[in-house]
Image: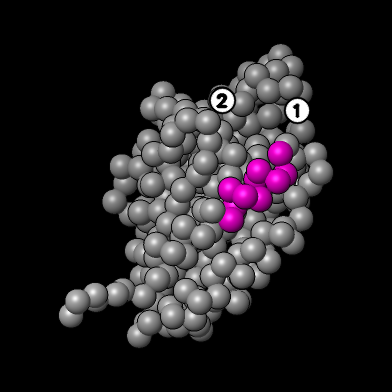
């Protein structure tokens, strides 16, 4: 096994172009099957991958920035900070990175689910070229991502929008933290004059990769809160029943029940008209 520490991002991309190295930063998945015998390229200290900034359009998060650093940064949307606080424990959050959480292709990646509902994009580079890809298009299946061996995720780009201040994130797992989620739900929205104007909902761990609930979004957008309250149960029952979970996912019936409960809680708590009893 070889181990190489590049001096710059360009140096790292040149090393990746040989096809010999596996890049890593936090290293929390290094002992996974099929990885431990690979030649390693350590990118965790490259300055180009360690910045968080706002360019007027996107909040740009370097791929080697850790969960703990993101949680403390004032630029980061509240929903992402909420999700991070439920990721593992402090020790892992101090080393686990945003790029790594995406690149490992897990359907249970907490930050990836939030990236999807925030319409985040990825800046992906290789030696001599770069491309920008929507996070929701990055996943092709379990552990299958749109990333070539000579490519590196360099930045996560999150559009900055006012309605991100309204958000919901929750997950069900064996413990409140330091646990992989069984099911997670994330959402951001805006409401004007009791009408839903903007909405993004995502589910994690139900399928082989995090997904947007575009069918529910289309049904809810433009509806009044009174209409949502009246139609909530029927809408969610039909949606969850038709959710096509892979047969190899454990406890499909249980996962569907949890999906229903989390989505129902979201709509009940956040989209129910305020009542003024006694006034």
Residue 230, visible in the rendered structure = yes
Numbered disc in front, either 2 or 1 = 2
Magenta region includes residue 45 = no
Q: Is the residue 6 above or below the residue 164 in the image? A: above
| Circle 2 Cα neighbour tier, 10 Å, few/some/many (<14 / 14–19 / ≥20) | some
**How far apart are the alpha carbons under marks 2 and 1?**
18 Å
- Which quadrant would residue 232 be assigned to in this image? bottom right
Is label 1 in a helix, a strand or a loop? Answer: loop
- Which quadrant would residue 21 be assigned to in this image? top right
In the picture of the structure, the residue carrying the numbered disc 2 is 27
What kind of secondary structure does the magenta stretch mostly adopt?
A: helix
- Which quadrant would residue 37 be assigned to in this image? top right
Q: Quadrant of the N terminus?
A: top right
Residue 219 in the image: state x and y as whole percent: 60, 77
In-front residue for pair 270/48:
270
In-front residue for pair 137/268:
268
Write the start and end of the magenta stretch as one range.
Answer: 251-260
* Residue 20 numbered mark, or none: 1
Q: Is the residue 259 above or below the residue 57 in the image? A: above
Magenta region includes residue 259 = yes
């Amino acid at each position: 096994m070889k181990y190489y520490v590049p001096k710059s991002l360009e140096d790292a991309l040149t090393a990746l172009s040989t096809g010999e190295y596996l890049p890593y930063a936090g290293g929390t998945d290094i002992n996974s099957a099929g990885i431990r015998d690979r030649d390693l390229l350590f990118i965790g200290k490259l300055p180009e991958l360690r910045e968080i900034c706002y360019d007027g359009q996107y909040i740009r998060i370097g791929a080697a920035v850790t969960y703990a650093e993101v949680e403390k940064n004032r630029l980061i949307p509240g929903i992402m900070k909420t999700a991070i606080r439920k990721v593992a424990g402090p020790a892992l959050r101090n080393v686990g990175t945003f790029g790594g959480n995406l690149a490992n292709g897990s359907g249970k990646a907490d930050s990836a689910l939030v990236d999807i509902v925030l319409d985040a994009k990825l800046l992906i580079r290789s030696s001599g070229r770069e491309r920008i890809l929507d996070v929701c298009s990055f996943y092709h299946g379990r552990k299958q991502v749109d990333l070539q061996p000579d490519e590196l995720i360099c930045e996560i780009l999150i559009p900055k929008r006012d309605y991100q201040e309204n958000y919901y994130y929750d997950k069900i797992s064996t413990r409140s933290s330091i646990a992989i989620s069984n099911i997670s739900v994330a959402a951001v929205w805006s409401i004007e004059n009791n009408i839903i104007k903007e909405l993004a909902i995502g589910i994690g761990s139900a399928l082989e990769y995090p997904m947007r609930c575009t069918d529910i979004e289309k049904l809810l957008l433009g509806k009044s809160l009174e209409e949502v309250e009246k139609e909530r149960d029927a809408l969610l029952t039909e949606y969850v029943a038709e959710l096509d979970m892979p047969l190899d996912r454990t406890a499909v019936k249980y996962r569907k029940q949890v999906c229903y409960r989390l989505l129902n809680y979201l709509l009940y708590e956040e989209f129910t008209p305020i009542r003024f009893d006694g006034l």
